[in-house]
Amino acid sequence: MAIGKLYIGRKVRELREANRATQGQFAERIGISTSYLNQIENNQRPVSAAVLLALAEKFQIDIAELSTGEGDRLLSALSEALNDPLFETYSPSLQELKLVAQNAPGLAHALITCHQAYRRNSEQLASIDDTIGRGASFVETTPYEEVRDFFHFVDNYIHEIDALAETLAADLGLGEGDNHTALAAHLEQRHGVRVVRGIAGDEAIRRFDSRARILTLNPYAPAPTRDFQLALQIAQFNAREEIDRVVGSAGFRTEEAYEICRLGLQNYFAGALILPYQSFLKAARELRHDIELLAARFGASLEQVCHRLSTLQRPGQKGIPIFFARIDRAGNITKRHSAAKLQFARFGAACPLWNVHQAFETPGRIIRQLAETPDGVRYLCLATQITKGGGGYRANHPRYALALGCEISYADAFVYADDMDLGNRTAFDPIGISCRICERTKCASRAVPPLKRKLIVDHDMRGSLPYRLSES
């Protein structure tokens, strides 16, 4: 099969940096000139079939993983933006969108950013009538969205921070015994920080007194939470320079975004320290992604395990491309990432037919679903409910549903797929991404009409919905 033009400059650059090679060294190893490699890394020239084969041979990577991931995420976000009625006179073909995403990703990102600003301004203007007389102020969510998109478009993987955490985990022997003791000892011996238990009435999970060098942990928090907070404190000491370097190069527009990203990267380091990359990837394969067994082996929570699975995107050592999300009882997606073709909607709630909503009805169980999106891609979907917090009967215990899954071609790598009828197309539930962009015309669970379909109202006939959708 002929290989089309691939502009994968960032992925090639990440692979080179992961192998700690200069452009000259890397170019020599794959048999091309340094100038050609420079053009590839800057997306000025596509990679040839010969280069792809050399990358596969020299670095033991799957060619397929070079052509997916970032392009799918950018393509999905661009498609959603252009589905807005603002662009009702323009309906680009899938091929046009692919050309923009591959050849002009900077322009695509700029258009997505403009569309976000347009939506925020439109929502603010629409609410003026309700708020002008009450003195309400608008909440600017741009910093959070900036950081969310930063992690989304770097594939939720930051190599320098991940590798730094993995090295420290090996030095401390994490995953081989009592993580809490090893983490606390490192803080005391390396940084002069003493770890103590909190007192009754202090609701803080973690509190650090920089003058007294005392780190106080909530004694009622679950053990994985306490260990994670120790790891986060270590991130503030051990990874400060790397985190500042990554944050400084992100180009955020506000100081708030910088601080939110800094906290996000500290959390990233903590997760990578508790669940070191190569040992966790090996265990995930051995245990066939049984999240309960992975949590038990590493002394982690189910959420920590699921989140970590979504970050296994190291060039040359990638895990299964999965999607991961955390959803509250109101349907809000509070965490999300997808290395699969399924990309979560940037606006609006998740599809009501997705099994993640059922997780709240069956606490303590991992429920499964075979699902198919409108583009014909099929998935294995897993969902389970978790409860946060501690502190006894009167404490607040927020509940969330975790969603995890993969494209059906990878289902054999999951223990959960063993007795499912993967070859039976009728066993797959039709789901969408979000009602506002879903093109399914006969969905009785639809919450709102799709943005680019006209509504047909028949006063003499009523179906499951009070309207029908036009075919175009």
Image (cartoon, rainbow, N blue to C red):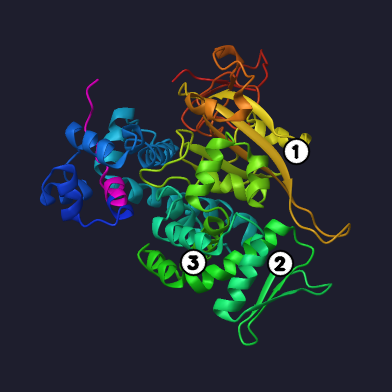
Residue at left offset 45%, top offset 57% = 162
- Mark sitting on residue 262: 3
Quadrant of image for the N terminus: top left
Quarter where residue 88 is shown: top left
Image: magenta residue range:
1-15
- Mark sitting on residue 360: 1
What residue is shown with label 2? Answer: 205
**Position of residue 29 in the picture relative to residue 169 (left or right):** left
* Residue 43 on the magenta segment: no
Residue 254: x, y in percent?
Answer: 44, 68
Residue 217: x, y in percent?
Answer: 72, 70
Q: For the residue marked with disc 3, what is the amino acid? A: Arg
Q: For the residue marked with disc 2, what is the amino acid? A: Ile
Among all residues in the image, which is located at the extreme bottom? Answer: 211
Disc 3 from disc 1: Cα separation: 32 Å
Q: Sort mark 3 into few (<14), some (14-19) or many (20+) by Cα contacts within 10 Å.
A: many
Say whether disc 3 or disc 1 marks the residue closer to the N-terminus. Answer: 3
User: On screen, 209 above or below 203?
Assistant: below
Among all residues in the image, which is located at the extreme right? Answer: 393
